[in-house]
Amino acid sequence: MSLTDPDRLFPIEPSARALARDLHTSVCDLPIISPHGHCDPRWFAENARFENPAALFVIPDHYVFRMLISQGVAPEDLGIPRVDAGQVETDPRKIWRLFAQHFHLFRGTPSAMWLNHSFEHVFGLNTPLSAETADACYDHIEAMLQTDAFLPRALFEDFNVEMLATTEGALDDLRWHRQIRESGWSGRVVTTYRPDAVVDPSFEGFAENVSQLGALTGEDTSSWQGYLNAHAARRAFFKSFGATASDHGHPSARTADLSQAEAADLFQKALRGTCSPEEEDVFRGHMLTEMARMSLEDGLVLQIHPGSRRNHSAQMFARFGRDKGFDIPGRTDYVQDLRPLLDAVGMEPALNIILFTLDETTYGRELAPLAGAYPALKLGPPWWFFDSYEGIKKFREATTETCGFYNTAGFNDDTRAFCSIPARHDVARRSDCAYLATLVRTGRLSEAEAFELAHDLSYRLAKEAYRL
Amino acid sequence: MSLTDPDRLFPIEPSARALARDLHTSVCDLPIISPHGHCDPRWFAENARFENPAALFVIPDHYVFRMLISQGVAPEDLGIPRVDAGQVETDPRKIWRLFAQHFHLFRGTPSAMWLNHSFEHVFGLNTPLSAETADACYDHIEAMLQTDAFLPRALFEDFNVEMLATTEGALDDLRWHRQIRESGWSGRVVTTYRPDAVVDPSFEGFAENVSQLGALTGEDTSSWQGYLNAHAARRAFFKSFGATASDHGHPSARTADLSQAEAADLFQKALRGTCSPEEEDVFRGHMLTEMARMSLEDGLVLQIHPGSRRNHSAQMFARFGRDKGFDIPGRTDYVQDLRPLLDAVGMEPALNIILFTLDETTYGRELAPLAGAYPALKLGPPWWFFDSYEGIKKFREATTETCGFYNTAGFNDDTRAFCSIPARHDVARRSDCAYLATLVRTGRLSEAEAFELAHDLSYRLAKEAYRL
Amino acid sequence: MSLTDPDRLFPIEPSARALARDLHTSVCDLPIISPHGHCDPRWFAENARFENPAALFVIPDHYVFRMLISQGVAPEDLGIPRVDAGQVETDPRKIWRLFAQHFHLFRGTPSAMWLNHSFEHVFGLNTPLSAETADACYDHIEAMLQTDAFLPRALFEDFNVEMLATTEGALDDLRWHRQIRESGWSGRVVTTYRPDAVVDPSFEGFAENVSQLGALTGEDTSSWQGYLNAHAARRAFFKSFGATASDHGHPSARTADLSQAEAADLFQKALRGTCSPEEEDVFRGHMLTEMARMSLEDGLVLQIHPGSRRNHSAQMFARFGRDKGFDIPGRTDYVQDLRPLLDAVGMEPALNIILFTLDETTYGRELAPLAGAYPALKLGPPWWFFDSYEGIKKFREATTETCGFYNTAGFNDDTRAFCSIPARHDVARRSDCAYLATLVRTGRLSEAEAFELAHDLSYRLAKEAYRL
């Protein structure tokens, strides 16, 4: 029995399906370009065995545990660590059983497709997961994890990953990246510069973080110019570990372009912790423009991931901390918010700014019109909840007519679930091939163009957008 | 000649259509669960004949008369009663002819499908309604209405309604429900607690209403605590007539969780009629949280129907009053607005809050992410203008990937058009079966899962969500 | 080789495709009704040859050059004239080559479909445009342009245009329209009254413009009443050149209905240039209501095109001026914003207000509910970025269920790209036929209704909505 349909996500009508299948066949063996994500570089540095099936598939994956929580399962019973280090379930088999027993909740979700893909194509399972099969599946995966073929580097190679970017904070020492490099392993794992903790005055310990930034770079970060220099130095340091991009996770797409004197004043206020929320927002927004200016110097691609209202549940945040599936999207206004940044650098063809969104209403109204005009802008792939068949379909249908394919930046998986990487790229390639086949069969594209585009969307555009 | 296509709403591609048909066959004879709506309990209490075709299909149905008004037909000519009791058309046959003459306006609308379904499957008509056939159709329906088979209770049974909830204001004496119960009739018709008139300070006669609430319950509703007690008492009274839910029709999804002292102060202000619009909004919002707390006590399900800008046309409101088809949806922000409520009770697995929306942009961005995280939340079916094939398709496509099927609450028809109930449930079942068949044929679901889900979506989820 | 698929835009499934083809066959030869657009009346007045392929297809078409700019092509190299009259490329062949070399950027866009349609069906080309074929295509088109068959009036007739509306400012002397009329040519080219420059206090030279309005009409436009009289006079003048409509391009859908005294005061402030931005907005909004009142007198249809944030890039605006592809849509709130206008005149069946939008989220939530209730409202076709297959599909799917087909106003092309007119109407007719065929094949419409609707949507509704 197969957990995955070989024709999954292709159009149903036979002639469109046949073409989608041919398009997919032409790209399904291309190497994976993973230019944005949250895998732990330590895995590839140490190349230690993954602990157990629950630690691999359940505990770290907020897509998975949020769904169980939404149906009344207690986070503690899923082994989610508590902030106060209070007791939670530690038996991975019990956690796995709870997961298996609720597996029907994922029907129709991308998680189900990613998990089944991993179960079947990574671990060779062919039994649907359920309460009845939980132990057998656990034992099977557990046994696999004991083998050398399932060590992180072996999987990386088996997945045919050409490059994978992780994301580290500006203060990170990049020790694991150093260890990877020094190990002589040929896998290409690079970092990404994520300075939220040192550009967002509302971040826990902002002033302390900035001071640490100074210590790391030898710059006087109590001054605005020293602070900018320190960023430039860290960016260079990250570049030396392969970084080709920075990433910015702001609550909105707000940007600003203050005078240097205004920015310097605001920076001092931020250090003193006396900014109003509005001033914090302006400072964050101004820093995006500063980062873009640095990008013009050092060539790093600027990624903006705005619009998540983080830690929506005070109770979950107090008990379990960040990134526990309770970050909820909100409306985002790109047209108004990006204007200062775009007035400063938007017409620069040498700059690559990649925009993401959690607000699908902006695809056709704001993002495609912007990306179809400003040379500096590209659209990132559907993000988070929208990294899915319907999400990709909606993205293509809403953006292509206005900004075409070539103002989009290929796919990236943005995941911390390593084993889902092949599945996610496969879903993206299938969904794009389905869209292309539909365009051909409705006379909107020639077959030759579709084959070229299938390759572009699966491989080339990501490499170019991220300067790999 | 048939007014309805036996394969209506199924996918066009033959293999998907065949599966959708099989799925539909498996659920089309399930009893109807109608846990939210606006039928008049008096019909079932008195079991009197429906007056005439116009009184049944035109005069009370705002879907129908708003369309005719939009094309220049005067409300008076449709027999819509005037607030000032001024003269309007009283000849039902003339009203019916006007309706028939404009029937082409409904092409492509759910109203056309509901009406044709009723004409054919309830009344046995097989002639398309038009100016030419108006009289013949009228006479046919009129003759049927004279027969016992078309009495309200007979239709209720013929429609295979397992249960039907009506909606009554907090001050209602539930006399018709009492009469139904005392009649010994076996049909299950229950009430729903709708306290808008006693929780919304901007409601006509709020203070008077609250005072009447006190009189009904023997509580001193001039005090905050007495007011809360009175709610608890009325909820218990409604429960004794079968209520399993309350319902709240607020202009926005705004909630608040004030301290009891603050709430008591605001309540006094509301009684004095001195609240600002903002304070009125906060009070309404706080009362949602109080209702949720009571739900934790008494088990009533909390329904929130927000986002309608009521009585948009001052002229229509002045001349014809409420509910005349001029309530227009507005943007709604669930992420921000529900936060106080969710911080108070959102993590309670014992609570059922069912959210509705008139803003489809919130499905993927807000509602599914929220319902896919908070145990207390479920999503109600597409509401009002979106209770339709496209509405249901959009709802499933936008929510399933993020919150799955099991955070949704099945279907409810929310109608005051009794004869449309079988049609509406049929449209919902067909639309869901079409969606499920599409998932199967694109490899996103197994056939076995689809059959189980068809049953869940048509029957089980509504019963569970409403605790029936 | 064909540049266009004869079955383009039809459903893929064979039975739906066959029906869509039959529907399209029944309407594809209907005359073109073009009741709103921006063609230059001078073309038809002088009937001079079009200059060259670049001047025809590239330089004036912001859909085209914005896409090239977005990929780093300098506007100067495309011959876009600079505000400071600085040097730009003047060799049309070089511009054409640059265009051809980037033609792949348009894959999947409506521009590609319009251009290929024009190349093949207007100019008889059958070679796909590319860097390699650039010169051959240029020479071919250039040769055609030398022939009498490609003079503006000949093309107008060849395109089977029954009527075409241009758009002129309130101060325009309509000399080209006069010349057309005096020429005795039988082509029906009419004007449209576009008073933005004399109703928007923020417009460059507002007071001067109003004074000129007085000079043109002999009214004292320094008084509110004189100003209104002058509008009435200009409307009558435009009507004498065939105008059946006015058009209003405001930043939002804001309307107001001030007392005459308030309006007069605000007008004085506007003349003095002392309005706040808020007051400017109110004045513009009030003028929509005044225009609607005049429409009740003189019968002109009122078109509202709101929601574009014009000249988003300060750099582009400073260097190249208006209408250079950097107008970006923004969120628009019709429910709140139109209320004053609708309270004043919305229930008038004798009035035709045609609403457009660049915010697709309003189709289902706001526009269809409004148009399905108010007699004065009709919905214009998808506009600008949404004048496309997906745009039309989304429009029909989101509006039909709520307001039906008969509250929509047929198609208009809104273009300044003359040769794209047949292509645009063909796309609209095909897209509508595809939608109708889908309705029939899913049991939502009968075939007979679909054929009638195909004619209505392609021809009749536009004539009726615009009173042609």
Image (cartoon, coloured by chain):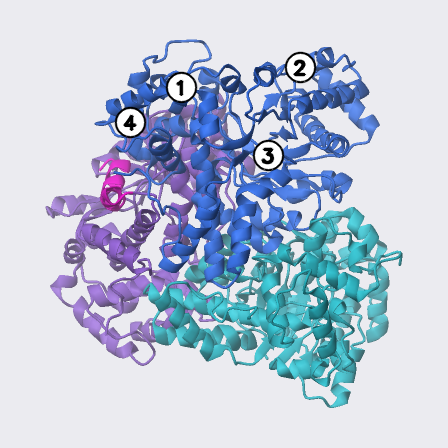
Chain colours: A blue, B purple, C cyan
* Residue mark closest to the camera, 1 vs 4: 1
Q: Which mark is residue A306?
A: 3
Report if residue B319 is visible in the image.
no
At x 82%, y 72%, the residue is C219
Name the chain under label 2. Answer: A
Counting residues from the start of the chain, the first of labels 4 and 2 encountered is: 4
Element under disc 1? helix
Element under disc 3? loop
The quarter in which the N terminus of chain C is drawn is bottom right
User: Which stretch did the figure color magenta?
Assistant: B446-468
Residue marked by disc 1: A148
In which quarter of the view is residue C130 placed? bottom right
How far separated are the C-alphas under marks 1 and 4? 26 Å
How far separated are the C-alphas under marks 3 and 4? 34 Å
How far separated are the C-alphas under marks 4 and 2? 42 Å
Counting residues from the start of the chain, the first of labels 2 and 1 encountered is: 1
Counting residues from the start of the chain, the first of labels 1 and 4 encountered is: 4
Labels 4 and 2 touching (C-beta < 8 A): no
Q: What residue type is labelled 2?
A: Asn
From the top left corner, tell me how far across and down residue B443 is, in percent. 33, 45
Q: Is the magenta stretch mostly helix, strand or loop?
A: helix
Q: Which residue lies furthest to the left in this view?
A: B184
Relative to B437, C368 lies left or right: right
How far separated are the C-alphas under marks 2 and 3? 22 Å
Labels 3 and 4 touching (C-beta < 8 A): no
Residue marked by disc 4: A100
Element under disc 4? helix
Residue marked by disc 2: A209
